[in-house]
Image (tube, coloured by chain):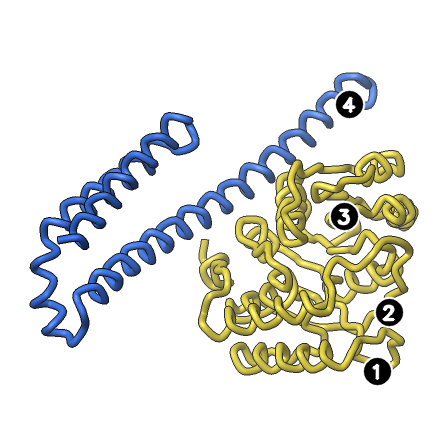
Amino acid sequence: MTARDTLVVVPAYNESGAVGDVVRALLDAGLDCVVVDDGSKDNTAEVARSAGAHVVVLPLNLGVGGALRCGFRYAVDRGYTRVVQCDADGQHPPSEIVRLLEVQAQEEAHLVIGSRFLDGSSDYEIGRARRLMMRVLSGIIKRSSGLRLNDTTSGFRCIAEPLLGEFSLSYPVHYLGDTFEAALVAARSGYRVIETPIHIRKRQAGNASASTLAAIRFIVRAVIASLAGLTFEIRSLDEVTAE
Amino acid sequence: MKQELVIALGGVGLALLVLFIARKHLLTLRYTVGWVVLAVVLTLSALLAGFVEPLANAVGMTATGVLLALASGTLLLICIQLSISVSGLSSQLRELTEANALLAARVEELAIDKSSPEEFKG
């Protein structure tokens, strides 16, 4: 696989302050990218377009999951076989994207998750409550799929066919659906999911999309959904490869 | 007798309110019919209120309690049905929003291709 097979999907909501630099850095690194403007109230789309990105503008705010699925559909329609999810706030440097792609190719994985905690050297800090919740989520994934994950809520990932095609058809819109739930469902369905250490930067501009209180609420909802079998569904790898 | 009268008046009042809202085009025919049928059932149930007493005795409740439970149960079922409808509509809205955005992006690409024919020829 080459960089030409790969599309970087950048979901963006009110990120006009940082998205231009993010797009320029991606293009300088030789990566194709599409910015999915998730119903922004500022001029995110215009800034991204001026920087040279392809832009898809959602007329309504669908949430990160909705923006990502739209980006996946854009990629599949144009024949890309891999996508990388990349934040529009400048936290994910292109050098790490390239590394993520290399790991995906070497390991022939369907889903590669960039972990902020895997090598223990990351300076990324989270609060105690959030760390505890992430341990709970890791425990659930381990129990229900056998997959051992450190960073269950990382939004820095590479997704390859045939999982990409499945995600373009069915992908949850709610918070944590695109991270925790997607990894859980992919692992349960027999896709190869691996984790690799990454280093991220601090936000270049804008604010985080969810408060701690909202994050806890969403995490509780995700736990209930996974324990009660209410996660979204994709076809298993066996079903896909049998065609 | 007073209780039956209140129930019947409630049913008639509900029917009138629903028809008023429907005439203002705030309610579609589908939901109007459903609520009117419910109002008719409520009005007719006033005639059957006398038969609630034996049922109440059988389950160890008062007649009023049984009527309240039936009313609450009916409203609960309606809420669940409406939640299902809203969930379906949300999903359809999301599909439509994504399809619209992808179509707009495609149109934009085609417009750019048309305005630069040399590039289009490759």
Mark 1, mark 3: which one is toward the viewer? Answer: 3
Q: Residues within 10 Å of mark 1 (few under 14, many from 20)?
A: few
With respect to residue A129, does B42 lie above or below? above
Residue A112 in the figure: left or right of residue A192: right
- For the point 40% across and 46% down, which residue is it? B85
Q: Chain letter of disc 4?
A: B
Same chain? Circles 2 and 3: yes
Percent across and percent down for residue B61 are 18, 73
Mark before the other along the chain sequence, 1 or 3: 3
- For the point 81% across and 39% down, which residue is it? A42
Q: Colour of chain A?
A: yellow
Percent across and percent down for residue A231 are 50, 64
Answer whether labels 2 and 1 touch (C-beta < 8 Å). Answer: no
Q: Nearer the viewer, residue A131 or A81?
A: A131
The residue that label 4 is drawn on is B112
Q: Colour of chain B?
A: blue
Q: Amino acid at mark 4?
A: Ile
Q: Amino acid at mark 1?
A: Gly
Number of numbered discs: 4
The residue that label 1 is drawn on is A120
Q: Amino acid at mark 3?
A: Ala
Percent across and percent down for residue A107 are 70, 69
Mark before the other along the chain sequence, 2 or 1: 1
- For the point 79% across and 55% down, which residue is it? A87
Q: Nearer the viewer, residue B82 or A52?
A: B82
- Label 4 sits on a secondary structure element that is helix
Residue B68 in the figure: left or right of residue A53: left
Quarter holding residue A48? top right
Q: Nearer the viewer, residue A87 or B51?
A: B51
- For the point 72% across and 73% down, which residue is it? A195
| Rendered image: mark on residue A199 | 2
Distance CA(mark 2)–CA(mark 4): 38 Å
